[in-house]
Image (tube, helix red, strand yellow):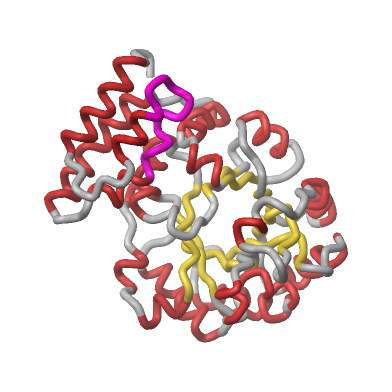
Amino acid sequence: MTHKRLSVAPMIDWTTTDYRYFARLFNPQVYLYTEMISTGALLYGNRARHLRFDKSEHPIVLQLGGADINEMTQCAEFAQQHGYDEVNINVGCPSDRVQHNKIGACLMAEPRTVADLVKHMQAAVDIPVTVKHRIGIDDFDSYEFMSDFVQTVAAAGCTRFIVHARTAWLQGLSPKQNREIPPLRYDDVYRLKQDFPELSIEINGGIESIADIEQHLQHIDGVMIGRAFYHNPYLLAEANVLWGQLIPKRSDIIAQLYPKLRAQAAQGESLSTMTRHYLGLFQGLTGARKWRQSLSGKPHLTIEDIERAADEVLQLNPDA
């Protein structure tokens, strides 16, 4: 696994700094991505809040949504100044809001625009600039369309591509449907690696187990997982075997969370905004449902509530 890579996918509303801190406790190796953050949010919003992260989150990648060269370049500079390890351009999000601003998956139809973004952003920063894209959009779903896109963007200097192995249907499907309905075409991603052996190619989409990860890594350079890691975070812990590392116990992970929760509570932060990311901690164990119920929809959750709920599950699962 020394040259292979495992990543947690950028997910809007999910891969916040609170989640990333939690995810890091399971696995020290994986790359963590922010949610997609628009250039507008960084240029005109609360930049410090959008860009904040805990030092434990390294290696961490800022994913940007935008198409304006000057704005994207400026935001890449923000990423470097704030200590991010990489910056990633979103060319995969199919939402209407993103299309309206000409960012996300619709940019696959404009490879020269993406190439120009890469060129200018790389010239401005020392950290890598990478691209996450789909295998196609709408009727432009041939292998050749994707291959031409990658060739154009690679010629501008991008060396790492993360490929969501589904076409994005920009008309007629919601973002949620776009993650589930278009068929997965893993072979197209494998072929991309064969045709561009000098590039780092990672695969994303529908990957749910350690066996799946191992299978893909026989063909390409990295695996990115979103929902499976989020809903069953212990999969992140089990992935330590890929590096020959020990698998941490859930009881140790929850113990490491308490100091962070206490610090957040002392600062007046709502614990429920953090614990919403912890619902899957005991996925598959006796008492997991009760744990979720104890944490869900409780705006005035206390540390004692969380400890009590965790202790109940751990008593039922003493080896966890």
x and y percent of residue 187 in the render?
Answer: 82, 46
Q: Is residue 279 magenta?
A: yes
75 relative to 296, above or below: below
Residue 5 lies in quadrant = top right
Looking at the image, which residue sits at the far left? Answer: 266
Q: On screen, 16 above or below 319? A: below
Residue 176 sits in quarter: bottom right
Nearer-the-camera pick, 314 or 219: 314
In this rendering, position of residue 77 left or right of residue 190? left
Quadrant for residue 162, please give it: bottom right
Relative to 289, 284 lies left or right: right
Residue sitting at x 39%, y 81% = 43
User: Residue 152 in the image: x percent, y percent?
Assistant: 76, 72
Q: Viewed as shown, does residue 250 lie left or right of 223?
A: left
Left or right: 202 in relation to 289? right
Residue 298 at x, y percent in the picture = 26, 45
Q: Position of residue 272 (x, y in %)?
A: 27, 48
Residue 200 shown in magenta: no
Please give the range of residues in magenta: 277-289
Residue at point 36%, 40% (across, down): 278
Quadrant of the drawing holding the N terminus: top right
Examine the rendered structure and indicate whether residue 147 appears above or below residue 209: below
